[in-house]
């Protein structure tokens, strides 16, 4: 039922009740009373239904606001990850072996280091590669265990490889 129709029904029932009271006709008073009670019951049902709709709309709005906040947080995290990733260049220290090396311009007080590209790009982890042997020809990611070859293995004892 629409609001104007509902209000018309209540007005009609109230007017019928007033007319019956003025005429002091007991049967008309009882009939008008029942009609007024019926209209008030319908009004109460409409109020309850409207309140339920308002509550559902408020719940939906809260859910949407939460979703927006979650997406904003996710965007901020992705922007942070992109900014951190931008500090590194993909380098090939040995044919077929790629690592991420910190850019000289982004280094600041940090020493030159390489990180695991798989951990950085897939897990958002900055895992610094560690030397696997004394001559620094293999480096290992402490997070995922990937081993990276960074130089030829010398046939003679020579200077350790440093990058």
Image: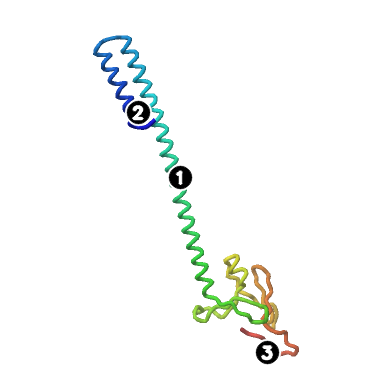
Pointers 3 and 1 in contact (CB under 8 A)? no
Q: Position of residue 138 (x, y in %)?
A: 69, 79
Which secondary structure lies at badge 3? loop
User: In the image, is residue 57 above or below residue 49?
Assistant: below
Q: Is residue 138 above or below residue 154?
A: above
Outermost residue on the right side: it is 155
In this picture, residue 133 sits left or right of residue 87: right
* Residue plotted at (46% across, 55% down): 69
Distance in Å between CA atoms under marks 2 and 3: 95 Å
Residues 138 and 18: in front is 18
According to the image, label 3 marks what residue?
159
Q: CA distance from mark 3 to mark 1?
A: 67 Å
Label 3 environment density (alpha carbons within 10 Å; few <14, some 14–19, many ≥20): few
Which residue is pictured at 31% across the width and 13% down the height? 29
Q: Position of residue 90 (x, y in %)?
A: 59, 77
The residue carrying mark 2 is 6
Q: Residues within 10 Å of mark 1 (few under 14, many from 20)?
A: few
Q: Quadrant of residue 19?
A: top left
Q: Position of residue 148 (x, y in %)?
A: 67, 76
**Marks 2 and 3: which is nearer the front?**
2
User: What is the distance, in whole Å, between disc 2 and disc 1 at their CAs?
Assistant: 28 Å
Q: Is residue 76 left or right of residue 125?
A: left
Q: Nearer the viewer, mark 2 or mark 1?
A: 2
Q: Are marks 2 and 3 in contact (CB under 8 Å)?
A: no
Circles 2 and 1: CB atoms closer than 8 Å: no
| Image quadrant occupied by the N terminus | top left
Residue tagged by mark 1?
A: 60
The residue drawn where x is 62% and y is 76% is: 99
- Lower position in the chain sequence, tag 2 or tag 3: 2
Q: What secondary structure is marked by label 2?
A: helix
């Amino acid at each position: 039922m629409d609001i104007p129709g509902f209000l018309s029904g209540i007005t009609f029932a109230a007017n019928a009740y007033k007319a019956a009271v003025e005429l002091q006709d007991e049967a008309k008073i009882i009939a008008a009373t029942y009609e007024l009670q019926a209209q008030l019951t319908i009004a109460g049902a409409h109020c309850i239904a409207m309140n339920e709709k308002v509550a559902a709309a408020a719940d939906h709005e809260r859910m949407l606001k939460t979703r927006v906040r979650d997406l904003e947080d996710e965007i901020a995290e992705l922007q942070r990850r992109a900014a951190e990733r931008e500090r590194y260049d993909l380098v090939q220290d040995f044919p077929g072996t790629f690592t991420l090396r910190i850019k000289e311009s982004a280094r600041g007080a940090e020493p030159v280091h390489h990180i695991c590209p798989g951990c950085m790009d897939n897990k958002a982890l900055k895992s610094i590669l560690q030397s696997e042997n004394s001559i620094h020809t293999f480096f290992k990611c402490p997070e995922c265990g990937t081993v990276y070859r960074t130089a030829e293995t010398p046939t003679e004892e020579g200077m350790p490889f440093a990058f």
